[in-house]
Amino acid sequence: MATPTAIAALNASVYTPGDQMLLTVTYADADTKPLTVTIVVTDAQGNSSAPVRVSAIIDPLALTVTDDSGRTWTRVSDNGAVAVYRAVA
């Protein structure tokens, strides 16, 4: 099993209280396995539907963001590879 990787960056290095803080996390896992299931329906006469595909991820990743001040970080977006979180300084 591969170990997940993550790189994180804040939008600034110094904040004034009340400033918006944006944290961008780029993450991956080399052994996450995408799975595609294809379905075709065929009737008794041999007529078949168009293929329908559905996807899933085996071994999905979960992100947890905390800091040592107890600040609440809210997820703004996450596409499965890059996540953005927001908090107030």
Image (cartoon, rainbow, N blue to C red):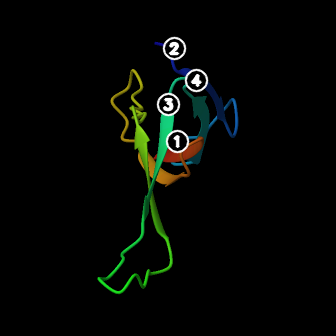
Q: Earlier in the sequence, mark 3 or mark 2?
A: 2
Residue 76: give x, y in percent of width and height.
50, 55
Q: Quadrant of residue 37?
A: bottom left
Q: Secondary structure at mark 2?
A: loop
Classify mark 1: residues with Cα within 10 Å, few (<14), some (14-19) or many (20+). few
Q: Which residue is mark 3?
A: 32
The one nearer the camera, 78 or 36, is 36
Work out whether mark 1 precedes mark 4 in sequence or the reverse, and give the earlier one: 1
84 above or below 12? below
Between 28 and 49, which is closer to the camera in this rendering? 49
Q: CA distance from mark 1 to mark 2?
A: 39 Å
In percent of width and height, residue 28 lies at 58, 30
Left or right side of 70 for 53: right
Label drawn at residue 17 = 1
Q: CA distance from mark 3 to mark 2?
A: 9 Å
Q: Earlier in the sequence, mark 2 or mark 4?
A: 2
Do the residues bearing badges 2 and 4 touch, measured as CB atoms within 8 Å? yes
Q: Is residue 6 left or right of residue 75?
A: right
Quick check: marks 1 and 4 in contact, CB under 8 Å? Answer: no
Mark 4 — residue?
A: 30
Q: Is residue 13 above or below residue 49?
A: above
Whether tag 3 and tag 4 are in contact, CB under 8 A, the answer is: yes
Q: Label 3 near label 1: C-beta < 8 Å?
A: no
Task: Choose top left, top right, bottom left or bottom right for residue 12.
Answer: top right
Q: Is residue 8 above or below residue 36?
A: above
- Going by the picture, which residue comes out furthest to the front? 45
Q: Amino acid at mark 3?
A: Thr
- Mark 1 or mark 4, whichever is nearer to me: 4
On residue 2, which mark appears? 2
